[in-house]
Amino acid sequence: MNVAYTLLRAYHETWISEPTRTTNRAFDERRTELRADTKAVTVDWTQRALLQTYQQCRIPDWDGHDARPVTAETLLMARRVLDVLPPGLPQPAFGAEPDGELTMEWYRSPRRLLSVSIRDDGDLNYAALIGTERVFGQVSFCGALPDTLATLIRKVHFK
């Protein structure tokens, strides 16, 4: 809940009736519950999409062109990365690469996209196109989403 809303709410509560205050509090509690439920559904859907990608690509030659299988270790690393995405950032789409890495992709338009390849050892290779700017590199996953990636996700979706 933002600060302005809270202050406005406190000001108005000084001149509204008790039944209205009770209704407003119930509404606020239900809105909070719905937000939590929506987040849980989104996380559940995202986890299922990641698992489905893994299941489709865990056997050798899954693409018909000698692709390496995605390993359970790579899946676990991808889940760890997914679990630390800050609230408010959009959830990624998933894919796999012929070298056995999983990818997380954020796409807004052909000139606003980010792809992050996840290796089982925690190395994250990324490439982004934001307008005419091309950004790429490698960072290590150490239990928190690297600031570089959080910034790129925001640039792709919010600017």
Image: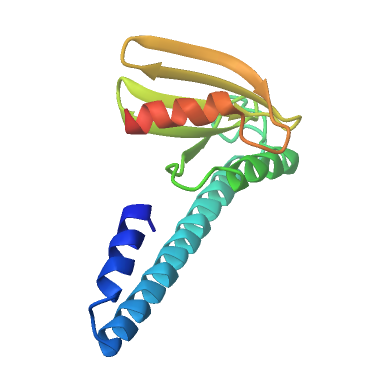
Q: x, y (%) of residue 149?
A: 54, 27
Q: x, y (%) of residue 16?
A: 23, 80
Q: Nearer the viewer, residue 129 or 96?
A: 129
Q: Is residue 137 above or below residue 110?
A: above
Q: Nearer the viewer, residue 20 or 102?
A: 20
Q: Is residue 53 above or below residue 5?
A: above
Q: Nearer the viewer, residue 67 or 150?
A: 150
Q: x, y (%) of residue 142?
A: 73, 33
In this orientation, does residue 8 appear? yes
Q: x, y (%) of residue 20?
A: 25, 84
Left or right, 63 with respect to 7, comes to: right
The residue depicted at 57 percent of the width and 27 percent of the height is 147
Q: Is residue 98 above or below residue 5?
A: above
| Picture quadrant where residue 6 is located | bottom left
The residue depicted at 35 percent of the width and 33 percent of the height is 157
Left or right, 23 with respect to 54, comes to: left
The residue depicted at 58 percent of the width and 50 percent of the height is 51
In this orientation, does residue 58 appear? no
Seen from this angle, which residue lies furthest bottom? 19
Seen from this angle, which residue lies furthest front? 14
Q: Quadrant of the N terminus?
A: bottom left
The residue depicted at 47 percent of the width and 13 percent of the height is 135
Left or right, 110 with respect to 75, comes to: left
